[in-house]
Image: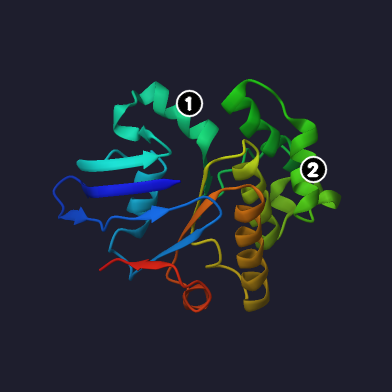
Amino acid sequence: MISTKNITFSYQNQATFQFPDLICQAKETLLITGNSGVGKTTLLHLLGGLLRPASGEILIGSQNLNDLTEKQLDAFRGQNIGLVLQQSHFVESFNVLENVVLASWLASGKKETEKATAILSHLGMQEHLHKMTSQLSMGQQQRVSIARALINNPKILLADEPTSSLDDVSTAKVADLLENLAAEYNTALIIVTHDSRLKDRFTNQISLS
């Protein structure tokens, strides 16, 4: 479960963002919407511990992220937060399987090759394990990103515009996939988007303005 209270953030020499309080339980999906420039991605980065709020609290379970040092926050993020960002940031010299295994090794020091193989297969990527990520379609790369985000059984799964570059059919598939995986992995799913196709699908929404 994740919840926030009185979160604010400001970039240098820019206006301060004041974000509404939110709560998302395990197996639930929360959609964060709004026009460009209202701070959707900033909020997602705050929830993921990639940025620190100027004020307010972010709790994952009982852990207040503000109470963690940078080193502790890095470790906590690796073990509890799955991130599906707009830019996948794959290691280009690694194949699909190696990119997912790397995420487990960075979080725990263990190479969970069997688990990575199982998750990728579950996502329909069993025939692409040894391909380079540059050989994949956008939709396939999205699935690898999702597998990488799930490898450490996170409590929270954060997805930034996961369907913005996909056609209608692929968008529906990715939405189904994320929602089903959140339920299956007992994960709270938060999606940041301006995609009207997702707005029509999910009823639990917060709109930033």
Residue found at x 69% / y 50%: 134
195 and 94: which is toward the camera = 195
The residue at 62%/78% (across/down) is 168
Q: Which colouring convention does the figure follow?
A: rainbow
Location of the C terminus (image quadrant): bottom left
Q: Is residue 172 left or right of residue 163?
A: right
- The structure residue drawn at horizontal position 34% and vertical position 26%, both measured from the top left corner, is 68
Picture coordinates of residue 49, whole percent (x, y): 38, 38
In the rendered view, would you say 44 is above or below 113?
Answer: below
Q: Which residue is mark 2?
A: 118
Instruction: Kindly state the secondary structure of the residue where label 2 is placed.
Output: helix
- SS for tag 1? helix
Q: Which residue is mark 1?
A: 75
On the picture, is 93 further left or further right than 20? Answer: right
Q: Give the spatial CA distance, label 2 vs label 1.
A: 24 Å
- The reply to whether discs 2 and 1 touch (Cβ–Cβ < 8 Å) is no
